[in-house]
Amino acid sequence: MPLVNMKPLLRDAMDNGYAVAAFNLVDYNTTKAMVKAAEELNAPVICQTSAKTIKYFSHKEIVSWVRTVAEDSPVPVVLHLDHCKDIAMIEACAKAGWTSIMIDASELPFEQNLTESLKVREIAEKYGVGMEAELGQIMGVEDDEHVAEEDSVLTDPADAKRFCDALDLSAFACAVGTAHGFYRGEPVVDFDRIAAINAATRTPMALHGGTGLSDETFAKAIARGSAKINISTNLKHVWVKSFVDYHLANPKDFEPLRVGDAQYQACKAMFHGFIEKFGGKDRGPAFLNKLPKAA
Ligand code: 13P
C-alpha cells in the first residue's frame, strides 16, 4: 500500500497504548527486513532515515526502496526523516515522498528553536506530511552530532506545552533521560516527566535512544504516552555482527547473496522483537480500518 502519514498513526498508538517502532534504515536489505517483520506481525512500522544516510545514497534511491517494499505490503509504513537541521534537506525529503519530517533545532534557545520549527510546520502543511520537532537536548551521538551528558537538558513540561501548542506535531521529541548510542551505566529515565509532558501536550511522544532500554522501561514509557520508539544503534551492531559471524562460521563462502541473507534474517529477527515488545502486533489492520475511505 502507499506510504502513510505519521500523524494519524501515532494518534492511534497513543490512544490505544502501544508504540510504533522506528528504525534508522541503512540500506535496501534493512528496509525490506523492517517492513517484512512488520508484515509478519500485522503491525505498522516507521522506516526512518538519518541525514547522513540520505547524503550517502540519495533521496531518489531511498524513496524508491521504501515505496517498493511498502507497496507490496498490506501494513502501514511511514517514511520519516530523523534529526535534521537543514531546512533545504527537509523540504527536499517532503517533496521526494517522505511522509514525515523532523526538524532538530534543539541546540537553539527556545524562541529560536520555535521559529525554525515553525518554518518546517509550513513545509509539512505544504506537502501534507507529518512532523516531529525536538525540545530539550538528548545526550549521546546521533548523525555524528555529540551531546555530552553535562550539556543535556531535560525538557520542561510547561515549555513543552507552549512548543507543542504552536506546532501541532505528529511526534514530540524531548529529553527525558534516554540517550543515543549504548548506555554506559544504568539509564535513569524520568517517567514522571514523560507523564507530565504528555498530560501537558497531549502529543504523541517520540522516545529517542531506544537501544539498551529494558522491557520494563519500554512498557512504562508507552503507558505514559511514548508512541514512537527509535532504534538505531542496535541495528548498526546487528548488521555488522551478523556479517562477521557468518564469515567466521563459513570462511570459504564468498557468495554475497548468502552473506546478505544472513544479515537480512538477523536484522528481521531484531525488528520483530522490538515491534512485538512495543505492542504493535495486529495494530496495522485496526488502524487502517479507522482511516477515512477514499471517495
Ligand atoms: P539509539 O541509537 O540509541 O537506538 O537511538 C536512536 C534514535 O533515537 C534515533 O533518533
Image (cartoon, grey):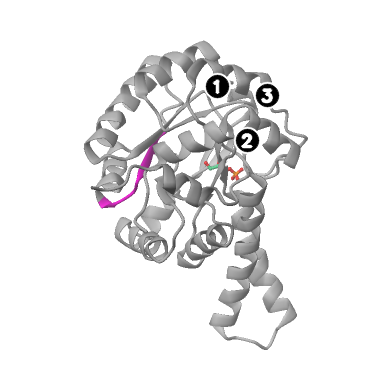
Q: Which residue is mark 1?
A: 198
Among all residues in the image, which is located at the extreme bottom? 252
Classify 10 Å Cα crowding around label 1: few (below 14), some (14-19), many (20 and above). Answer: many
User: Which mark lies nearer to you, 3 or 1?
Assistant: 1
Give the residue type that dot 3 points to.
Phe
**Is 5 left or right of 238, judged from the image as shown?**
left
Q: Which residue is mark 2?
A: 179
Would you identify the image quadrant in which residue 16 lies? Answer: top right
Residue 97: in magenta span: yes
Mark with earlier residue (3, 1): 3
Residue 191: numbered disc: 3
User: Which mark lies nearer to you, 2 or 3?
Assistant: 3
Would you identify the image quadrant in which residue 238 lies? Answer: bottom right
Classify 10 Å Cα crowding around label 3: few (below 14), some (14-19), many (20 and above). Answer: some
Magenta-colored span: 96-103
Q: CA distance from mark 3 to mark 1?
A: 11 Å
